[in-house]
Amino acid sequence: MICLTITETSTEDTCRVIQNLSLDIEAIECRFDCIVDVDTACIDSIGSCLQKHRPKVSSIATIRRAQDGGRWSESEAARLALVRYCLQSGFFTYVDVEEDVYDTVVQAHKDGPTDKSAENDGIKGSATSTVICSFHSCSTFPADLRDMVHAMLTLGTPVKIAVMVSNSEEQLQLFQLARYLEKQCRQWFILIGMGPYGVFSRIMYRQLGFFLTYAHDAEEAPAPGMLSYAALRDEYRLGLHRKDTPLFGIIGNPIEQTRSPRFHNNVFTKASIDALYVPFLIDDCTRFMQLVRSLGIRGFSVTIPFKREIVNTLTRVDALAERCGAVNTVICEGDDYVGYNTDYIGFLQPLRPILATQSDDTDKLMRAAVLGAGGASSSVIAGLLELAFHVTVFNRTLAKAQSIAQRYPERVAAERLEKSIPFGFDCIVQCTKIGMYPDTKASPIPDYAFQGNEIVYDIVYNPVQTAFLSRAAAAGCICINGLAMFEAQAQAQATMFARAVASNGTVPMT
Ligand code: ATR
C-alpha cells in the first residue's frame, strides 16, 4: 500500500489533512517532528482526529531526528518521551522507533508509562501499537548493512530500512538485501533506497517484497527521492499491480526529464495490460543488466547517454540497430537480451510529410547538419541517409563525429561544433542535450543566423519548444519539435513491450 507522509507544521493543518484524506488512502504517517512545539496535547488531538475521521486507515507515528532526515530540533530525552507517549496512547497502528533507541523505548514501554501526562491519562486510543524498528543512513549505503539488518531481525518486529543509494552497484546491493529480507524477515519489512538512484525501489516496492511505500503531498519531497502520492497512484497506478506484475523501465543519466514512464504506464492501462514501467537512474550498464536479470525485467528503453554503451551488454542487436549503431529498446527473449532501435522510425515520422510538401526539385542535393554525435545522432544520421541527404555532423568532441563519418565516407562529413555553422544546410537537426530540462535557456550554435528556409528539428522534447527552436521559428524556419519523434518511437516500443508481456518473455520478437 501507499502510505501518505504528512509533514504539516501545525496540529490544525495535520487534522485538516486527515479529515480531507481521499478515500483510497490506506495508510498515513504522521511526522510529529515537523510540527512546531509538538507536545502530548498535540499527539492527543491528532490521534483523536484519526480515530474519529479515519478509523480504518493504518497510521504510523514518527518523530524523526535530524540525523535520520527528520526535523526534530529539541533534546533526545524530550523526543523519546514523546515516542513512548505515542506508543502508550493507543492511537496509532504503528510507532516508528529507531534501532539504536529500540531497547530503551520498548523496554520502558513494557515496564509501564514513564511520561507524566501518559501516566495521568492512561491509554486513550483503541489500538495496540506495533513498533516498527527503523534504521536510516541519509548519506551513504553502509558497508555493514547486512549485519545491521540481521541484528534488527532478531527483534521479531517489522523493520524499516532507508539508505542512500548513489550508484548502480548500490542499486544491486539494495535488491540483494530485499531478497535477503524476504527470506529472513518473519514480519513485514520496508526497504527504501533514498536519493535519485533509489527512486525505482519506491515505485516497485511490491515486486521487491515491501509492505508499503511512502509518498508525500507537499510542495517539496520530505525525503530525497520520495514521490508524490498523485504520481504513485495516477502515473504508476501502484494500486493495480501484483508482486509478479511484468516489469519494464527506462535507463538514463539524467532521467528526470523523461516522459517515458507516463507514456508507457498510460498505454498499459489503456490496453488493460498488467505491467509496470519504472525509471532507473544508472551509472553502469553492466551492473544494471545484473539487476535486469535478477528482477526479470522484460524490456526497457535506453536514453542519454547509454544508447551505444548498452550494446556491449546484450546478447545481440537486430539489423536496424546494427545499422544505426545505437539501441534505444531492449527486450528479454528467453535467456537473451536483444537490442532494437525505434529512434530511427520515430525520427523519420514527422520529417517525411514535411519533405514531401517541399521537394519540387527532386534532383537537388539535400544537405543536413546534425549537431551532436551520440547515440541519438547516429540513428538520426541513418534516417537522413535513407532520405538521400548528405550530412555534416558537428560535435564538441570531434573524434566522435569522425568515427560516425568514417562509416559513411561518401556521404557524411565531420566538423567540430562551434558557436555557428556555415550557411547552406536545408535541414538542421539538434541532437545534443543542450537546452534540455533543467538547462532550458541554453541553445547550441548561438551565433548562427537562421535564414528562414531551413527545416529545423530539435529532438529534445522537454521542453517542447526549446530556445533553439524558438530562435529558428522567429526567423521563419519550418520547425519540428522532439515530441512527435518521442511519441512515434515510444509507440513502437509499446508494441514490443505488449508483445513481450503476451509472450511471457520466452518467444523471440518478430
Ligand atoms: P544520446 O544517446 O542521447 O545521443 P549521448 O550519446 O551522451 O546521448 O550524446 C550526447 C551528445 O550531446 C554528444 O554529442 C555530446 O557531445 P560530446 O560527444 O562532445 O560529449 C553532446 N553534448 C552534451 N552536452 C553538450 C554540451 N554542453 N555542449 C556540446 N555538446 C554537448
Image (cartoon, helix red, strand yellow):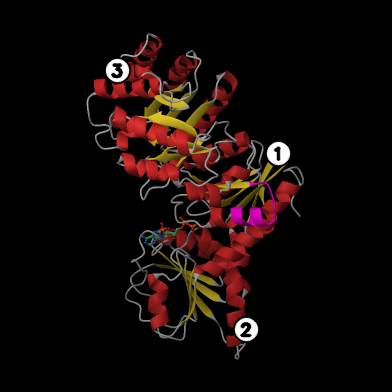
Q: Residue flagged by tag 1: what amino acid is it? A: Asp
Q: Is residue 408 visible?
A: no
Task: Residue at 43% x, 71% y: name it.
Answer: 465
Crowd tier of the residue under label 1, counting other residues whose Cα lies within 10 Å: few below 14, some 14–19, many 20 or above: few
Residue placed under numbered mark 2 in the picture: 356
Asked if labels 2 and 3 touch by Cβ distance under 8 angstroms, the answer is no
The N terminus - image quarter: top right
Disc 3 Cβ-to-ligand 1 distance below 8 Å: no
Q: Earlier in the sequence, mark 3 or mark 2?
A: 3
Res. 18 mark: none
Q: Which residue is mark 3?
A: 115
Indicate the position of residue 46 as horizontal and vertical percent values.
Answer: 38, 35
Asked which secondary structure carries label 2, the reply is: helix
Left/right of residue 309 with respect to residue 488 in the rendered view: left
| Front in this rendered view, residue 368 or 128 | 128
Count of marks, rendered view: 3
Q: Residue 373, image x and y in percent?
A: 47, 62
Q: Is residue 269 magenta?
A: yes
